[in-house]
Image: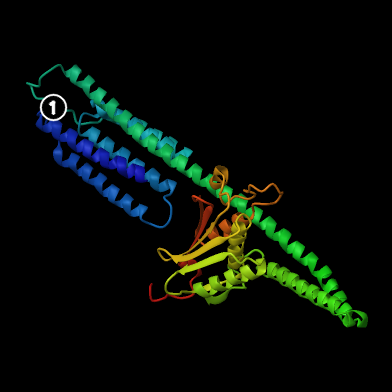
């Protein structure tokens, strides 16, 4: 519809220029009032078409079909007042046929072919002849040939403009569909990972419970209780079992939903301070420098998956660097977390495929899922994940819009 609106504006300008040129330069008297009335009708049609474009729902085939039929009627009226089929611009009917073939469904395209053919046939018999002045310069046939050349050039230019624009739209649509398919494949992959993780968590529950019972029996055993070293070892094993059970419970609670039932009220600063501190303790990592430049705190909803995304981001940096720098900031009403490491950086292929599964330089099978899962969480919340190499190391940036995780409006808006 937008293409038709633009072409219709060109048609109005071209017809107005042609009418004035014929009337003023060649002194050929045309019925100006009805012909200008047809142009006014085209302007009204364009205004109505723009109104249709501003609606929320898509343009239908019927609306495009009616618009093209009205264009055919307007062209037929202009030709009727200016010589009918003897007018060299009668070939403009072909432009309407091409537009219909490109834009309309098959049945409506053929109806448009019939409509233009009938209009052409009627214009061969019913029209107002052009009254030429007696002193018109040049040969009449030569003027007709010149008019045919102008019509051919006009149709050729308009067709190239229109078809080129339509092809560009189709290429953009194909690229969008390819991106949607890629995201669907990635999300299917995430579902499979979630199902495998959930299944593994269920299967691990039984042996972990059995080990917990056995360790409890050992702890009550008098022989082990009298040996301080063995008692301490059993106590440490029980603590590790409880930690494993907590991890399994976390997997079961968070599988499948990035904003699920485990969401809790917190703030940006409280969440990041706690998550980074927990990560340093869990990984026994002491060389993490954390800088908070977020500004005024904002209440947000926190859940296990969001925390795990930050864990994965930090794990990815800690695997390749003995020290990391973490910077929290607020940019354009978005939470921005930057993690810089001192590792070897990303290969060009890794940067090009950032956010895709198994995109890792590590030789072990199954690696490269950390940033993939972080990128999926970012995309689910409407954010982005980006990476770049520094002079030494690399920087990974997680950006999340506060509107996606905010609990209420803060004073900063």
Q: Depth check: give the residue in front, 410 or 95.
A: 410
Establish if 221 lies above or below 8. Answer: below
Q: Which residue is mark 1?
A: 131
* x and y, in percent, of residue 305 in the image: 61, 66
Q: Position of residue 147 (x, y in %)?
A: 22, 24
Residue positioned 42% across, 72% down in the render = 295
Q: Residue furthest right?
A: 223
In this view, the residue farthest toward the left is: 135
Q: Is residue 392 visible?
A: yes
Residue 373: tell me if it is visible: no
Q: Crowdedness of circle 1 by 10 Å Cα count: few (<14), some, many (20+)?
A: few
| Quadrant of the image containing the C terminus | bottom left
Q: Residue at x 46, y 67 (%)?
A: 402
Local secondary structure at mark 1: loop
Write the residue at 71% across / 60% down: 195
Does residue 101 appear left or right of residue 247 in this picture?
Answer: left
For the rendered model, the colour scheme is rainbow
- Residue 236 drawn at (x, y percent): 78, 74
Would you say 37 lies left or right of 413 here? left
Residue 196 horizontal/vertical position (percent): 73, 59
Q: Is residue 10 above or below residue 184?
A: above
Kindly indicate the quadrant of the structure image that contains residue 95.
top left
Number of labelled discs? Answer: 1
Q: Nearer the viewer, residue 259 or 125?
A: 259
The residue shown at (24%, 33%) is 79
Asked which quadrant contains residue 217, the reply is bottom right
Q: Nearer the viewer, residue 198 or 307?
A: 307
């Amino acid at each position: 519809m937008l293409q038709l609106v633009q072409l219709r504006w060109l048609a109005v300008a071209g017809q107005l220029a042609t009418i004035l040129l014929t009337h003023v330069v060649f002194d050929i008297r045309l019925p100006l009032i009805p012909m200008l009335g047809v142009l006014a009708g085209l302007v009204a049609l364009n205004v109505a078409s723009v109104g249709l474009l501003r609606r929320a729902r898509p343009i239908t085939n019927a609306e495009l079909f009616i618009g093209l039929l009205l264009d055919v009627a307007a062209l037929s009226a202009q030709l009727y007042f200016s010589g009918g089929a003897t007018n060299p611009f009668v070939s403009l009917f072909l432009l309407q046929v091409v537009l219909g073939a490109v834009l309309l469904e098959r049945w409506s395209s053929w109806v448009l072919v019939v409509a233009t053919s009938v209009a052409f046939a009627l214009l061969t018999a019913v029209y107002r002849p052009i009254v030429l002045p007696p002193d018109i310069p040049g040969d009449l046939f030569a003027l007709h040939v010149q008019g045919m050349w102008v019509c051919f050039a006009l149709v050729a230019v308009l067709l190239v403009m229109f078809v080129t624009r339509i092809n560009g739209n189709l290429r953009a649509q194909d690229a969008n569909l390819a991106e949607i398919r890629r995201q669907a494949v990635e999300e299917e992959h995430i579902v499979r990972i979630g199902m495998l993780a959930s299944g593994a968590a269920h299967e691990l529950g039984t042996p972990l419970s059995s080990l917990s019972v056995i360790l409890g029996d050992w702890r009550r055993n008098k022989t082990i209780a009298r040996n301080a070293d063995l008692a301490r070892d059993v106590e440490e094993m029980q603590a590790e079992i409880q930690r494993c059970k907590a991890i399994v419970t976390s997997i079961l609670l968070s599988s499948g939903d990035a904003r699920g039932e485990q969401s809790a009220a917190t703030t940006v600063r409280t969440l990041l301070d706690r998550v980074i501190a927990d990560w340093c303790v869990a990984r026994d990592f002491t060389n993490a420098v954390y800088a908070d430049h977020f500004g005024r705190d904002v209440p947000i909803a926190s859940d296990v998956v969001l925390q795990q995304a930050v864990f994965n981001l930090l794990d990815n940096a800690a695997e390749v660097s003995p020290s990391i720098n973490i910077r929290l900031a607020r940019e354009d009403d978005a939470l921005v977390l930057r993690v810089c490491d001192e590792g070897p950086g990303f290969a060009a292929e890794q940067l090009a495929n950032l956010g895709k599964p198994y995109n890792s330089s590590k030789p072990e099978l199954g690696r490269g899922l950390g940033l993939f899962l972080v990128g999926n969480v970012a995309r689910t919340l409407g954010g982005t994940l980006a990476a770049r190499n520094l002079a030494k190391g690399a920087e990974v940036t997680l950006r999340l819009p506060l509107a996606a995780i905010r609990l209420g409006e803060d004073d900063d808006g």
